[in-house]
Image: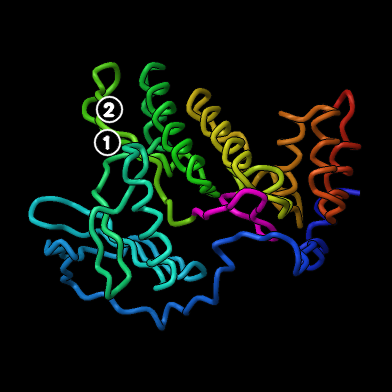
């Protein structure tokens, strides 16, 4: 049986944590308000610093996450403004304060507290787009090294990023090709991160983007720092090969086939061995997703390695 046949059933039968299970997830801290209850943003805002910001346009709206992202200016400088729910605002403001010592994490430089807005300096590029410029290997290594430093700073504070991907690695640079000078590299979208105390995991949710997330994140298993490291590894592969190895084109999908079934098959084919697959099954702890993993494993043979 093809793994896609299991996916629809799994979505309604995935194991949820029992009441006495240790559980940590920013997504379940408390009920969030709808977008309609969030404060509307005026064209002109003043930060706690007193700096004036003029909204230029709405860049992105994520209704499910109750977030809006704006491009703004102040004088001749550009800024990114992120509006979140009030509860998220308090949570991440405290998190930012604990991370300010690390230059490789994108931290808000100002806030508009009454409207739950964080203010960030605008950065010109991200790793996803920069790699297409055929960067020298020395530049790629520096960007990845800085990214890892940022991730290490998060993990030192028991923070799991949950959405590490190439377009969350922001780069400020000048010049092109071998003349390129990288001024700064920062790991962004900390607003998707969560404190995960020792002995706890994020469970019961698929975190991150499907093209970059780990197998256990696909399977709504226990997510922790190793899940971030898997995603960082995929970012490294992308930076060197210039290819998103888990991207699935529409032409690759059969009728009724989900991209996730192909992604899981590739993850196991590219990186799995017998010990690793058995370890994943044990880690998933009798989740319905174990059947998907077993079906994928059993379909491999000499003609389908």
Q: Residue at x 73, y 42 (%)?
A: 264
Considering only vertical position in the picture, is 48 above or below 144? below
Nearer to me, 115 or 2: 115
Considering only vertical position in the picture, is 22 above or below 142? below
Q: Which secondary structure, mark 1?
A: strand
- Checking the image for residue 43, the label placed there is none
Does the segment drawn in magenta span residue 202? yes
Specify start and end residues of the magenta stretch as a single range. 193-209
Marks 2 and 1 sit apart, C-alpha to C-alpha, by 6 Å
- Which one is earlier in the sequence, the residue at label 2 or at label 1? 1
> 134 left or right of 248?
left
> 75 left or right of 30?
left
Q: Residue at x 21, y 60 (%)?
A: 72
Rendering coords of residue 283 (x, y %):
79, 44
Q: Which residue is mark 1?
A: 172
Is there a contact, CB below 8 Å, between mark 2 and mark 1?
yes
Neighbourhood count class around disc 2 (C-alpha, 10 Å): few under 14, some 14–19, many 20 upward: some
Extreme residue toward the bottom, this view: 37
Rendering coords of residue 107 (x, y %):
32, 49
């Amino acid at each position: 049986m093809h793994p896609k046949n299991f996916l629809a059933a799994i979505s309604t039968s995935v194991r949820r944590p029992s009441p006495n299970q240790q559980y940590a997830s920013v997504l379940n801290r408390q009920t969030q308000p709808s977008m309609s209850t969030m404060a509307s943003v005026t064209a002109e805002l003043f930060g706690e610093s007193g700096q004036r910001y003029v909204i230029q346009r709405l860049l992105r709206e994520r209704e499910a996450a109750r977030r809006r992202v704006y491009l703004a200016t102040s004088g001749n400088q550009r800024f990114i403004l992120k509006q979140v729910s009030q509860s998220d605002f308090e949570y991440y403001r405290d998190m930012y304060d604990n991370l300010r010592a690390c230059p490789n994490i994108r931290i808000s430089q100002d806030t508009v507290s009454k409207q739950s807005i964080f203010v960030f300096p605008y950065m010109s590029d991200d790793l996803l787009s920069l790699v297409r410029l055929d960067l020298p290997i020395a530049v790629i290594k520096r960007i990845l090294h800085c990214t890892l430093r940022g991730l290490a700073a998060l993990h030192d504070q028991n923070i799991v990023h949950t959405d590490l991907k190439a377009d969350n690695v922001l780069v400020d640079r000048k010049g092109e090709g071998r003349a390129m000078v990288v001024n700064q590299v920062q790991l962004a979208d900390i607003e998707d991160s969560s404190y995960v105390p020792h002995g706890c995991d994020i469970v019961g949710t698929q975190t991150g983007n499907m093209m970059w997330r780990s197998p256990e994140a696909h399977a709504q298993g226990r997510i922790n720092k190793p899940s971030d490291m898997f995603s960082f590894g995929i970012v490294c592969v992308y930076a060197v090969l210039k290819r998103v190895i888990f991207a699935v084109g529409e032409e690759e999908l059969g009728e009724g086939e989900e991209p996730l079934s192909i992604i899981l098959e590739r993850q196991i084919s590219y990186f799995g061995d017998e010990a690793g697959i058995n370890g994943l099954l044990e880690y998933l702890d009798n989740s319905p997703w174990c059947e998907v993993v077993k079906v994928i494993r059993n379909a491999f043979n000499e003609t389908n390695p």
